[in-house]
Amino acid sequence: MTASGNSRWGLILAVWAAGLGAAAQYGKISVIFGRMGELYPQAGNALSFSVSLVGTLGILLGAVAGLYVAAFGYRRTLVWALWAGAAMSALQALHLPFGLFLASRVVEGLSHLGVVVAGPVLIAQLSSERGRGLAMTLWSTFFAVAFTLLAWFGLPLADAWGLLALFGGHAAVMAALALLLGFALRGVPVPERAPLPRLAELPGLHLPVYRSPWISAPAAGWLFYTCCFVAVLTVIPPYIAADMRAFVLGAMPLASIAVSMTLGVYLLRFLPGVRLAQLGFLACAAAALWLWMMPGAPAACIAMAGAMGLVQGGSFAAVPQLNGSAADRSQASGAMAQMGNLGNTVGTPLMVLSLSLGGFGGMMAVLLVLFLCGAAVHQLLAARRRGPG
C-alpha cells in the first residue's frame, strides 16, 4: 500500500498503459495476421509461429517468472521489459528475415512476461486498500482495451503506411512508456528483492506455487476463462447473422470492459474477488445455455462477453486479496500468465475439435462445462483454504 494511504492514480494509469503495450505484442500480429503473407510470402503455415512463440514462453516460464521478477526488482523488470519490447518492434519494422523475425518474437515473449508479472504487483503497491479493487479491475481490461485500440488506430495506420509502420508505432509507444515509467517510478517504495533462484531449482519451483490454494487460485480459474474468451471470438462469428456480425464482434470486448469497470467494481465492494469470478462463471454458463438454444443471437453473445468481464475483474482482484506479500503476488501473477497462455493456446483448437465432432451443440456443451469447471475449481480451492494446514 502507498505510504499516504491514497491510491496514486496517475502512476497506476501509466503502469496500466504498459500492460496495453504488452497486450499489443500479441495484438499487433493478430489484427494483421491475414496480411502477414505480404511481408513473408514464402513462410506459408509457419506464419502461425509469429503468434504462438510469444505464448510458448509464457507456458514454459510463467510460474517461475514471478520468482525472477521478485529477485530482479519490480520497477527494473517493468522498465527493461518495455525497452526490450521497444527494441524488438523497432527491429521488426526494418523487415527482418523471417527466421530473425521469429527470434525477435521469442524475445518479445520474455518482454511480455516481465510486464504482466511486474505490472499487477506494482499496481497493488500503488493502490490504497479501498481503491485496490478498482485498480486491479482496471488492470484486468488491458488485453481487451489493447485489441480495441489496435482495431481503431492500428489497422488504419497499417492501411495507410504499411504493415511495418504498425511495428514502428508500437516501438515508439513502448519506448515512450519505458522513459515515462523509468522516471516516474524512481521514488516509489517497492518491496525488497527476493533471493535469485538457481536454474537447477526451476523444475521444483512450480510445485509450491500450484500446491498453494492461495497463490494458485487466480490462475486456476484463469485457465478456464482464457480457454473460452479468444475461442468464443474465433468460432462463434460464423453463426452470427452477417448484417450484425461486425457490430457484435466489436461490442463483445467493449461489453466485457464495461461490465468489469462498472458492475464488477461495484460488486467488489461487497464480494471478494473469488466470489465475483465464480458469479461471472455461472453467468457465463447461463449465457452459454441461451446461446445454445438460440445460436448466434447477438444479445446472448454480448451477455456472455459481459459476464466474462466479471471473471476477469474478480480474478485479478483475487491476487492481492489472497496473497499478502509482494513475492506471493508476483508468483500468483506469474502463474496467471502461465495458465493464461496455456488457455489461449489450447482453447481455440479444443473448440474447433468439439465443433467438428459434435456440431454447434457439441461445442456449446464443451463451453458450458469449461465455465462450470471455472466456478467449481474456485470452490474446491476455497475449501482447501478453510481446511487444516
Image: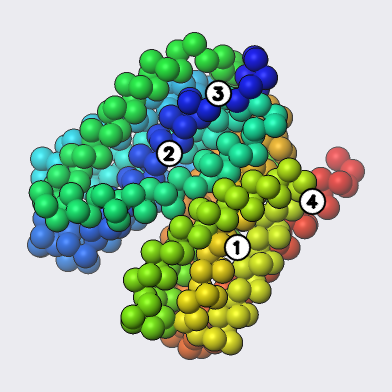
Q: Label 1 belongs to which residue? A: 307
* Residue carrying label 2: 19
Q: What's the CA distance linking mark 4 and mark 1? A: 21 Å
- Residues at marks 2 and 1, CA–CA distance in whole angstroms: 22 Å
Total count of labels: 4
Q: Could you tell me if the residues under marks 4 and 3 are in contact, i.e. CB atoms within 8 Å?
A: no
In three-dimensional space, the C-alpha distance between marks 4 and 3, rounded to whole angstroms, equals: 31 Å
Mark 3 surroundings: few (<14), some (14-19) or many (≥20) residues within 10 A: some
Picture colour scheme: rainbow
Amino acid bearing label 4: Ala
**Residue mark closest to the camera, 4 vs 3:** 3
Q: Nearer the viewer, residue 99 or 143?
A: 143
Give the position of the N terminus as an image quadrant. top right
Q: Are marks 2 and 1 in contact (CB under 8 Å)?
A: no
Decide which of tag 4 and tag 2 comes sooner along the chain: 2
State the residue at coordinates (48%, 25%): 11
The earlier-in-sequence mark between 1 and 3 is 3
Mark whose residue sits in front, 2 or 1? 1
Q: Is residue 221 above or below residue 214?
A: below
Q: Secondary structure at mark 2?
A: helix
Task: Please name which of the two marks, 4 or 1, marks the residue nearer to the observer.
Answer: 1
Q: Residue at x 43, y 29 (%)?
A: 14
Against 353, residue 136 (above or below) is above
Find numbered disc 3 in the image and state the secondary structure of the residue it sits on. Answer: loop
Tell me if I can see residue 256 in this picture: yes
Which mark is first along the chain, 3 or 2? 3
Crowdedness near tag 4: few (<14), some (14–19) or many (≥20) residues, C-alpha within 10 Å:
some
Residue ID for mark 4: 382
Q: Are marks 4 and 2 in contact (CB under 8 Å)?
A: no
Q: Amino acid at mark 3?
A: Arg
